[in-house]
Image: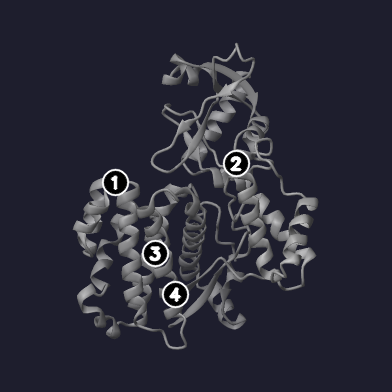
Amino acid sequence: MNHTIIQRIEDDLKSVAERKLPEEEFLRRLLEQFVFVAVSDSSEKNILEIVLLAGQGDEGMFLPVFTSPERFLSTPLAKKHELKKLPFDVLMRQIRPDTGLVVNPFNPVSHTVRWFVLQEHVPDFGSEAIKQEVTPPWLESVNAEFSKQEMPHRRRPWEAIRVWNEVNGVPISGSSIRARQIFDWFHVNTKPGSHMAGPLAEAAFYYDGAFWEVTIPLGCGSPSVDFLDMLRMPASVKLRFWNERNDLFIFVKFFADCFDYFYSVDDLRSSFASNPLLKGFIAAGREHITQAASLLLDTRPNAKAAEASRFALEIFLKTFLVAKGGLSEKEIKDLRHDLQKLLTRCLEVDPQSELRHIESKLSLYPDVAARYRAEDMSPRDLWTTYYTALTSGAVVVRPLSGRDTTKSIQIPPF
């Protein structure tokens, strides 16, 4: 690999690490290149044993790749392992599809990609390491079995994903290329309209004194959809909203936070299956923030939404402390329900966290012991409690999932 190509890859690596280059574009470019991997000395077996690194906690395994021999030689791996140059696309086909990627580990500039992001953007990821690929004959066979069971058509794509998981012994992301192939096949081969399983999630956005439904679409991979189509409001109101550029900017950021939060939670369910505390917090946070949106979208916004948002925020802060701070269940219980104490502890773990911006909003939330104070809140304050909680959830889960769509969604010009 000549110096020009190496420099190009390293420039891309720096750009994606600084969030200046979309992750999917970085992976697309990398698929056209050779990379270097650490291998065990396996000459006696006449096979290559590619070295993997263990992630933190329940993150699973990661494949370390290097952009040059020099990057490899500067790492601890060079003491016990050899170097092999391989095409990156070939390498991606050979590893298990629940393995993440880390480019130039132990170097000043590196980048980590979780397995579900690779499933979403790398065609044939893990194809040589699985027992059964998603093919039309396999889908026909699975669907024939579903027909014998008289399974409702709307359930079939989800059950097919479950069967694929069991057959291959690895999880499949709901936004992966394979999952989209499954949904597309059942879209064509089952009763029209039955594939409409609904959105991944629903959120609420405040504009012009009212709360409007926001749909987070299912299985679109990345937010290539027109985000304004996801905002349910009459055309006349939407036209006025389009001209309010400050409100439009807030919605774009809000939609990116919603997208990252709900897709990350969907991805992380499998990652933290062996950590009951973290798994429970992730599930509970989603439940409370979803409840808050439902209460806001009532014909008359229900002030209990502030209570649901308050519990969601508490759970998000506790999730942060467990995932990044390593706090035990006992330490979490000692902090009880005090949002200020929880936030202070979070900022002790990471003083630069974006969570520091929410401190001025904490006084709006009703206390656990005085929940009915929420009954007197204005719609604007209800929105603030909900918006603050949801965006905090996105801040907490983004580092766990590797998702960040804030750089890929832009406000179109007039």
Q: Residue furthest top?
A: 44
Q: Position of residue 299 (x, y in %)?
A: 47, 88
Q: Quadrant of the C terminus?
A: bottom right
Q: Is residue 75 visible?
A: no
Gap in angstroms between the C-alphas marked 1 and 3? 19 Å
Which picture quadrant has residue 363? bottom left
Q: CA distance from mark 2 to mark 3?
A: 27 Å
Residue carrying label 3: 284
Q: Secondary structure at mark 4?
A: helix
Q: Which residue is mark 2?
A: 97
Element on which disc 2 rests: loop
Rendered view: 318 above or below 60: below
Left or right placement of residue 123 versus residue 232 in this view: right
Residue type, label 1: Gly
Q: Residue at x 59, y 58 (%)?
A: 223
Residue at label 4?
Answer: 293
Element type at marker 3?
A: helix
Q: Earlier in the sequence, mark 1 or mark 4?
A: 4
Colouring method of the image: one colour
Give the alpha-carbon distance from disc 2 to disc 1, as whole Å. Answer: 28 Å
Task: From the viewer's side, name the closer residue of 51 and 241.
Answer: 51
> Mark 1 — residue?
325
